[in-house]
Amino acid sequence: KSKFPCRVKDTLQAAEKIGYPGILRARCTLGGLGSGFANNPEEFRDLSATGLSLSSQLLTERRMDGWDEVEYEVVRDAADVSDHKGSCRNMENFDPLGTHTGDSIVTAPSHIPPDDEDDTFRTTALKVIRHPGVVGECNIQYALNPWPKGYCVLEVDARYGIFVHPP
């Protein structure tokens, strides 16, 4: 549901579609300058004006503080013959979502998702990296909503992988 508005008016329209509360992230600024949380249209308008004075584009997303976070390291070869269980390893962020991953305590293997959800995340991770054709190692981060049950893909990072065209 992320949107990439370039004008304050577009940010407000994106917020209406995504819902409140939300997050605005200014593109290509250091230390989160011009970014923040907004709980209503007035806060979105003010933060958008600040963010767009520092950047040409804002990433507008829904806010998911307090959700759980799990990560999967996925390895895929060019022939796509990786073993399903052998190509995915999961980790769990001890801190709730909202703590920067680099500042979070990570445990492996994960303890949060039960086996059926773990299988869903593994299968989804492989589908996600196949779509753009990632070959090599890739990290996928999920946000898990404890109530109502659900999840979102937060980030896909081809750390030691390359993007090739899918077959």
Image: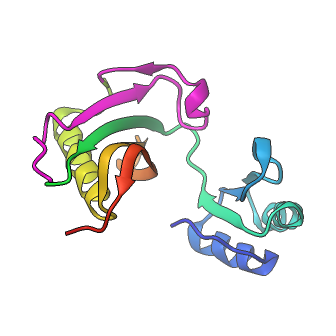
Residue at 24% in and 57% down: 127
Q: Is residue 88 left or right of residue 108?
A: left
Q: What stretch is highlighted in magenta?
A: 80-109
Of 76 and 15, nearer the camera is 76
Of 87 and 121, nearer the camera is 87
Asked whether residue 45 is drawn in magenta, I would say no
Q: Quadrant of the C terminus?
A: bottom left
Q: Is residue 20 left or right of residue 29?
A: left
Q: Residue 48, percent across and down?
A: 81, 65
Tell me: residue 102, above or below residue 119: above
Residue at 16% in and 40% down: 116
Q: Quadrant of residue 130 in the image?
A: bottom left
Q: Quadrant of residue 75 in the image?
A: top left
Q: Residue 23, percent across and down?
A: 67, 55
Q: Quadrant of residue 86 in the image?
A: top left
Q: Residue 95, percent across and down?
A: 53, 25
Asked whether residue 101 is drawn in magenta, I would say yes
Of 116 and 55, nearer the camera is 55
Tell me: residue 46, above or below residue 10: above
Q: Residue 73, percent across and down?
A: 33, 36
Tell me: residue 28, above or below residue 18: above
Residue at 39% in and 35% down: 70
Residue at 83% in and 68% down: 45
Give the color scheme: rainbow, by chain, secondary structure or one colour.
rainbow
